[in-house]
Image (cartoon, rainbow, N blue to C red):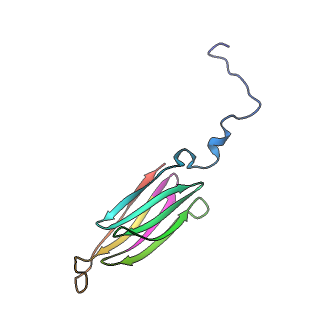
Amino acid sequence: MAENQIKKLDNDPLAHLEESPFARHAQAGGCFTIIGPIAICWKIEGSRIKICLVLAGIEIVCNYVDTANPCVTLEGNVLCAKASIKVCLEGNCLTYEATACYRDFPCIGMPWKCVSDKGTIICF
């Protein structure tokens, strides 16, 4: 067969690549630090993405985003940290809007230091 000829097939041998928008990242995951001890961790699980709020190294709350449920809000507190984070699947990107606060040790009686931020966690 010459290089410029196209062979026609009865089926699509690459159909499996369209199963999930995240198929090529099936083992992907990671964590994104908002500030100090406050982070968002994510992991692809099939056609969904598991999103977790991690405060001071402790996984506080998790939820899933996918094309049917593109946004979740995670809130929690532990020790000297608290956060409210909205994570959305926008197109092929995970984005966030967060307000995160922490107190210096020994925490009790210390003022909260807060930061608000928004941005992109990762694009697939």
Q: Tell me which residue sits at (47%, 57%) in the image.
A: 94
The majority secondary structure of the magenta stretch comes to strand
Q: Tell me which residue sits at (40%, 58%) in the image.
A: 31
State which quadrant residue 78 falls in. bottom left
24 on left or right of 55: right
- Where residue 88 appears, x then y in whole percent? 49, 62
Q: Residue furthest right?
A: 10
Question: Which region shows up in magenta?
Answer: 83-94
Q: Residue furthest top?
A: 2
- Where residue 25 appears, x then y in whole percent? 52, 47
Q: Tell me which residue sits at (61%, 49%) in the image.
A: 20
| Along the line of sight, the residue nearer the viewer: 91 or 2 | 2
- Where residue 75 appears, x then y in whole percent? 43, 75
Is 116 part of what is drawn in magenta? no
Q: Tell me which residue sits at (36%, 72%) in the image.
A: 99
- Where residue 29 appears, x then y in whole percent? 46, 54
| Along the line of sight, the residue nearer the viewer: 99 or 53 | 53
State which quadrant residue 13 falls in. top right
Image quadrant occupied by the N terminus: top right
Q: Residue furthest bottom?
A: 109
53 on left or right of 117: right
Residue 31 drawn above or below residue 60: above
56 on left or right of 27: left
Q: How many discs appear?
A: 0
Is 90 part of what is drawn in magenta? yes
Residue 86 drawn above or below residue 45: below
